[in-house]
Amino acid sequence: MIGLADCNNFYASCERVFKPSIRNKPVIVLSNNDGCVIARSNESKLLGIKMGEPAFKIKGLIKKYNINVFSTNFALYGDFSNRVMEILKSEVKSIEVYSIDEAFLDFSDFINAERAISIREKVKRWTGIPISIGVAPTKTLAKVANHIAKKYTKNGVFILNNNNLQRILNIFPVEDLWGIGIKYAKKLNYAGIYTALQFRDLDTDWIKRNFSINGVRLQDELKGIKHYSIESVLPRKKTICTTRSFGQEIQDYMILKEAISNFANSCATKLRKEESCCSSISVFLTTNKFNTKTSQYCPSIDLYFSTPTNDSIEIVSKANYALKMIYKKNYLYKKAGVIVKNIISQEEVQMSLFDTVDRRKKRKLMCSVDRINMIMGRDKVYLASQGVQKRWAIKQQQLSPCYTTQFSDLLTVKI
DNA sequence: TCTGGGGTCCTAGGACCC
DNA sequence: TCTGGGGTCCTAGGACCC
């Protein structure tokens, strides 16, 4: 059997851990630039606040119901995520960390409700984060079980088996299945398919034609035929990107260059963390697509490295060259990004016969930079082209303290 | 005033090879 | 009038996930 542990309203729950006064009160967490709603507590969901809703559109609601609003604090959520995952790891044979707030659990040895409940209680007691656990024969069904656990049970645990499978699939909306998104859901509804059970019993050829091979796999998984197993070792990433919307629109080349330098450096740092190198880089700019009055310009360009690299200096300078090629003045840019592609292991880099760069020396330099930044805090050492003013910085007006990762932000208790 | 960020997989079609 | 067959690789676009 496979389990899926999923943190309830994860970001909102993290914000609540050190702030008991907002428990049982509506909480929302906003995206970068305090733009959209990306997490909601149950109370906020009941008020009708939708996922992805622009914050400015619900200003009235926020005021009326005294909703607690937070900017995203990834340092906090990432740290809580690690803590939760460590506990889960210690409880089962192996886990697959599927996202910041979800993990598949290997229950191939044994599972019953008591075991699942005790795992759930341990996570709650040790971290303050409530989770739900769904258990079933396949990953797709474990996802279904988790939905049921979250929505309909008191103890946050649900085990899907032969006795209840038919009944659950019959009430489970097809659009809530793992792999059915908004477009597929519309297509299915149009064809008169509304439940998971209906989907399971569809003609396989029809599924293949309309939803490709993934649809067929989904159907199999609903029948209890495993297509996806628990992958405890994370595969190497195929692309890595750093992209941001700006706090305000930017026209100035030098400010853009600083931003791009930062994004490129961030990509290089992520590459080194994965022990990977990239062979190409893509840089893009976009104007504000929501502003219909100004003219739009969304250029991008791909450039290649003759020898795959993860060196910040090389990647930043290539990114800046790319920016130079696509930048046009007279446009107001709202968003920019750097993507590194064609990624391989740093151990598999094919050296060039005519390479003029002393790569061993550069690697040592980057190692030192990473170590300093790890010990002293991120971006203690950085490239000059990254600038110091950060005039492109994102807006975060409701940021909570980094309770668990910053000494200066430690909670103070008054007695 | 104000609309996120980071990924994966699959398929069709074009370009190329012999 | 009439123009093959079998294959690979790459990319863009579209779907999905969190």
Image (cartoon, coloured by chain):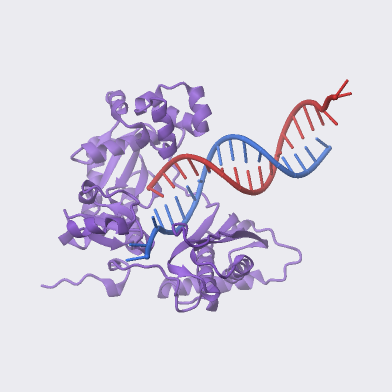
Chain colours: A purple, B blue, C red
Quarter of the C terminus of chain A within the rendering: bottom left
Quarter of the N terminus of chain A within the rendering: top left
Image location (x, y in percent) of residue A267: 52, 63
Image location (x, y in percent) of residue A380: 45, 76
Where is A307 relative to A118, above or below? below
- Of residues A29 and A91, the one nearer the viewer is A29
Tell me if residue A107 can be seen.
no
Residue shown at 36%/33% (left/top)?
A141
Where is A194 relative to A302, above or below? above
Image location (x, y in percent) of residue A74: 36, 61
In this picture, residue A85 sits left or right of residue A234: left
Residue shown at 46%/33% (left/top)?
A227
Where is A60 relative to A228, above or below? below
- Of residues A192 and A396, the one nearer the viewer is A192
- Of residues A314 and A385, the one nearer the viewer is A385
- Residue A390 quadrant: bottom left
Task: Single out the residue that lies furthest toward the left.
Answer: A415
Image location (x, y in percent) of residue A251: 51, 71
